[in-house]
Image (tube, rainbow, N blue to C red):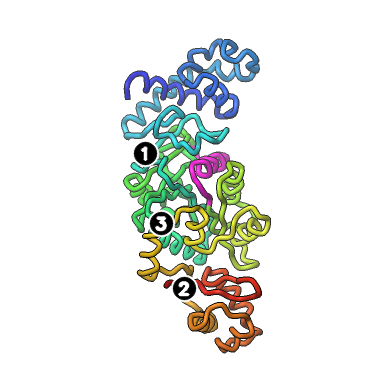
Amino acid sequence: MNHTDEREALCAMALSKLGYYNQAAFRQLYELTGSATEVMAHSKDITSLLPDASPRLKEMLADSDVMMRRAEEEMAFVQKYNIQVLHPAHPDYPQRLKECADAPLVLYYRGTADLNQTRVINIVGTRRSTPYGEDLIRQFITDLQQWCPKVLVVSGLAYGVDICAHRQALEKGMETVGVLAHGLDDLYPSRHRETARQMISQGGLLTEFMTHTNADKINFVRRNRIVAGMSDACILVESAAHGGGLITADIARGYDRDVFAFPGRVGDPYSEGCNNLIRDNGAMLLTSAYDFVRHMGWENDDLLAKARHEGIERQMFPDLSPDEQAVVDALLHHNDLQVNMLATQSGVPVTRLTSVLFELEMKGILRTLAGGVYHLYKNS
């Protein structure tokens, strides 16, 4: 970068560090001038820019020289490891994130993915994912890659849902970005280091934190706003009644992003958050990648036709119980049946049929039409 660009990056880094505990005020200062360099040039006489500047703001800016030296140290690190310093004036700064009032003044990015590509989603959820949730992610990304191959998958590189989403994206040849709660000199959890290494060349790692920053609890909450803000849609896979995934979904709604959630079995602890969110109209019920693509208006007729021709399945689980298979076979033979007729055609007693139908609907294999008619999603 040239001298002017480097100076702006340095000043943005220092300003971000100064404003760690008062993001709104420092964001206001930046937007007032449109330049971190200009703000830092007036750090000792900030009232010339902001006449009603609070005593607290003046006090925080008094440390500007110290923070500039810290920024210079950080600049040496980022240049050594080919890390980009993205500030709001940088063309590669996530444009979606700039719409958010609490967007960070600086992001540190190491990777190859375009953070401003046409379609960006995040997949979030519990750190204690179950085989059910992992199967949902696997099938969702498999089908999404077929229908919308150019989607950037964002998550937080944590245990459970996050790492499963990243790994499935990598396996399917999709780019994926991990948003970290610490600097790029470390990785938490360390067990995900190999996945992170792959992501650098097929996506990237992104953070607002300088080096030597601990992965403290508050930092995970802060990073959730980046995950939410840089994406078009938030997809919650599994969540307990309280958790980080729900926080991300709530932030996403506040940013006017689309929020989706996969339902789970009633009573399962790691489906409670998703089910509650759907019940309270905080998220749209999601059963398949097809549902998602259709809602987002991302359909590509040629790809959808090709997918159907190749027999890509939209259901989440190809393995069905004998009763479930009997119902599917009946609907394959004659679709759109009511319960009594379906019981007759499938041989499954009505006493068991209701629960079987519920399971099939939760798996995205069928849906209920008006009049209590059951419709099978078929690949044809």
Instruction: Name the kind of residue labelled 3 in the image.
Output: Asn
Residue tagged 1: 110
Circle nearer the viewer, 3 or 1: 3
Asked if the stretch drawn in magenta spans residue 201, the answer is no
Residue 46 located left or right of residue 52: left
Q: Please provide percent x and percent y for residue 140.
A: 46, 61
- For marks 2 and 1, the one nearer the N-term is 1
Q: Please provide percent x and percent y for residue 253.
A: 60, 46
Query: Disc 2 and disc 3: Cα gap in Å?
Result: 19 Å
Circle nearer the viewer, 2 or 1: 2
- For marks 2 and 3, the one nearer the N-term is 3
Q: Which mark is residue 378?
A: 2
Q: In the figure, 341 relative to 129: above or below?
A: below
Question: Residue sitting at 51 percent across and 27 percent down?
Answer: 17
Using the rendered view, name the quadrant where residue 165 is placed: bottom left
Residue tagged 3: 300
Q: Which secondary structure lies at badge 3?
A: loop
The residue lying toward the viewer, choosing from 111 and 91, is: 91
Instruction: Name the kind of residue labelled 2 in the image.
Output: Lys
Considering the whole magenta stretch, tell me its main secondary structure.
Answer: helix
The residue lying toward the viewer, choosing from 293 and 240, is: 293
Other-residue count near label 1 (Cα within 10 Å), few / some / many at <14 / 14–19 / ≥20: many
Question: Residue sitting at 37 percent across and 60 percent down?
Answer: 303
Residue 168 visible somewhere in the drawing:
no
Q: Which secondary structure lies at badge 1?
A: strand
- For marks 3 and 1, the one nearer the N-term is 1
Instruction: Name the kind of residue labelled 1 in the image.
Output: Arg
Query: Disc 2 and disc 1: Cα gap in Å?
Result: 42 Å
Q: State the extent of the magenta-drawn residues as a range.
A: 214-234
